[in-house]
Image: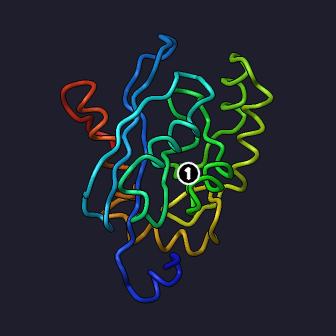
Amino acid sequence: MNLESLLKFNRTIRVIGFDDAPFIRGAGGNVNIAGIVCAGTRFEGMLWGQVEQDGLDATQSICKLLLGSKFLPQLHIILIDGLGFGGFNLVDLPELRNIIQLPCVAVMRRPPDLDAVKNAMSRLPNLEYRQKLLKLAGKIYEYPPFVFQVCGEEPEIIAKVLEKLTDCGKVPEALRLAHLISAAVIKGESSSSA
């Protein structure tokens, strides 16, 4: 069933939300990522993996976690917390969509300052490739309270789906839990801001 039908018939939407764990910027090495599976806003499972800090493996790492998981056949949509993991390890949103064959959405808390992003990225290798990934993610949509980029579905549908997947506030529950759980695993307790 596609997202539009799930909304129309008020069916449960199964989602996975990915966020990175806290890390020390500039330390190099790997950064942990959590993928939280929810049925609507109810926690159902978790994936745990790694990406290279400021590397180029975020898309492959997420695909590897998903393709080998028991959760993939049940999922309807993939959410990621922004495009960057472990700093500027950017997800290739169309590529993620092509491999996983589900709508893929990068959710942001606010519209990004793209000039500041490009300036920060300019200190890293592979600048042109990173800039290309930013462009490939496409238009940034604002459907208050949600700000997102999407591949594989119409933005109006995604805005309605995000509403269904959000308990309170403006962060879908799968992403909120990914943030809290990854912080707790690394620091021993969850952070206050999710």
| Residue drawn at (46%, 88%) of the image | 8
Q: Nearer the viewer, residue 99 or 111?
A: 99
Query: Closest to the observer: 179 or 62?
Result: 62
**Left or right: 92 in relation to 164:** right
Is residue 177 depicted above or below 20 in this figure? below
Q: Please state which amino acid type lies under the numbered disc 1.
A: Ala
Residue 31 x, y percent position in the rendering: 43, 24
Look at the picture and state if 190 lies above or below 92: above
Rendered residue at 62%/69% (across/down): 153
Q: Which residue is mark 1?
A: 106
Residue 172 x/y as whole percent: 39, 58
Q: Which residue is situated farthest in the top direction here?
A: 27
Quick check: can you spot residue 124? yes
Q: Where is residue 16? Give x, y as percent.
A: 40, 55
174 lies above or below 124: below
Q: Label 1: state its secondary structure.
A: strand
Q: Is residue 178 left or right of residue 93?
A: left
In this orientation, does residue 109 appear?
no
Q: Which quarter of the figure is the C terminus placed in?
A: top left
Q: Is residue 67 left or right of residue 12?
A: right
At horizontal 72% and vertical 53% (from top left) the residue drawn is 138
Where's residue 161, x and y in %?
47, 71
Question: What kind of colouring is applied to the model shown?
Answer: rainbow
Q: Residues within 10 Å of mark 1 (few under 14, many from 20)?
A: many
